Image (tube, grey):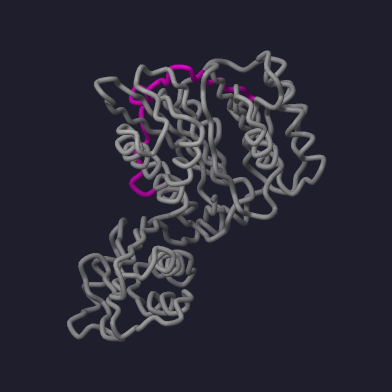
Amino acid sequence: MAVNLKVADEQSLLAVAGVKLMVAEAGIKKAERKDVLVIQLDKGNTVAGVFTQNRFCAAPVQVSKSHLGAGVQIRALVVNTGNANAGTGVAGREHALQVCKALAEELGCQPEQVLPFSTGVILEPLPVAKIIQALPARREANWAEAAEAIMTTDTAPKAASRTLSLDGVPVALTGIAKGAGMIHPNMATMLGFIATDAAITRPVLEQLVKEVADQSFNCISIDGDTSTNDSFMLICSGQSASSLIDSVDHPHYAPFKAVLLDLARELAQAIVRDGEGATKFITVKVEGGRSVAECKDIAYAIARSPLVKTAFFASDPNLGRLLAAIGYAGVTDLDVDRLSLYLDDVLVASAGGRHPGYKEADGQRVMQQSEITVRVVLERGSADATVWTCDFSYDYVRINADYRS
């Protein structure tokens, strides 16, 4: 029941030089489905990532952070779906390391040069033997198949590409993502991988991945639950002929970041559009704040509210729920008499209450749309923030009640 989700066709997804994709069928949760993805990297690449801030972060997150911190060149990423390998303690970390070791032996590199990722059911032991047995049978794949291989409750694969010219040299970017539930990333069960043939030094790449995550994947919420496995990775093969981006002041940094951010936002919004049971895609904009942080607090209060989300599902302009969410967002000195609330172009509330010209029929008209913008104007500064979310439907409850069935 995805909301206006555009599924990329295979031909539109650009190959990235220096990046080889392979998939396998391990039968982790279901037989005869792609559930293991290997992203193999040529020498000379750089890799950086951001991960969940959940204190119960999954074993593969812990191992990937350790391997990235070792400073070695990464040669492969391995992703399994069907099992999160989270809440699995020491045994889970050992299982993740066993997968790294098995793939490293296949590729002729060190286990520390492999980054593991998992998504699926939490608190269940990883069927490591199935994954290791499937690795030798992996086959070469394209980006569309790679996107399918990391799906869980997703109804459609999420992938997109971009290209830009840097001093006349074409540079390609292609990314995939998965996620439909347990989505409220705080990365400073969502996975995102973007590869490019641009050449970027690791310090710059590490800054870039944080900045882009904060303006894309860290601006979405489906149900307010921060996953144990959230990871967003940037891979630079360095195989384009464009000059090395070695500083944020490099003339190529800004145009490259703009295209990368556009791609990351498309993937992040695709997760929301495919939210479990979603029927509405909602943009929440908060403007005129004193800081981005307070704008985000208010936007997320709206985006997380079950009462707000169920009202959107019902197309019910019960918009007092929006005011309540704004009020409890934690901005203690907020002057509600200066605030304005809009539903698309309809001014709903001003001067501390219902706007005199607001008619419920206008609110009803907007609420029946599949895409809606909530705009809150605080009139206390120049900061702003935007968050993307969806509604709560009967299907969200059904999907999560039956998740392990």
Residue drawn at (48%, 45%) of the image: 210
User: In the rendering, at what x and y percent does residue 251 appear?
Assistant: 30, 33
Question: Image height check: is 227 above or below 99?
Answer: below
As for residue 334 lying within the magenta part, the answer is no
As for residue 21 lying within the magenta part, the answer is yes
Residue lying furthest right? 91
Question: Image height check: is 169 above or below 270?
Answer: above
User: In the rendering, at what x and y percent does residue 185 appear?
Assistant: 52, 52
Q: Nearer the viewer, residue 312 or 214?
A: 214
Question: Image height check: is 309 above or below 176?
Answer: below
Q: Nearer the viewer, residue 70 or 348?
A: 70
Tell me how many marks there are.
0
Residue drawn at (58%, 27%) of the image: 37
Magenta stretch, residue numbers: 1-25
Residue lying furthest left? 357
User: In the rendering, at what x and y percent does residue 121 appear?
Assistant: 67, 46
To which quarter of the image does residue 158 belong? top left
Residue drawn at (79%, 46%) of the image: 89
Question: Image height check: is 15 above or below 227?
Answer: above
Q: Nearer the viewer, residue 221 or 199?
A: 199
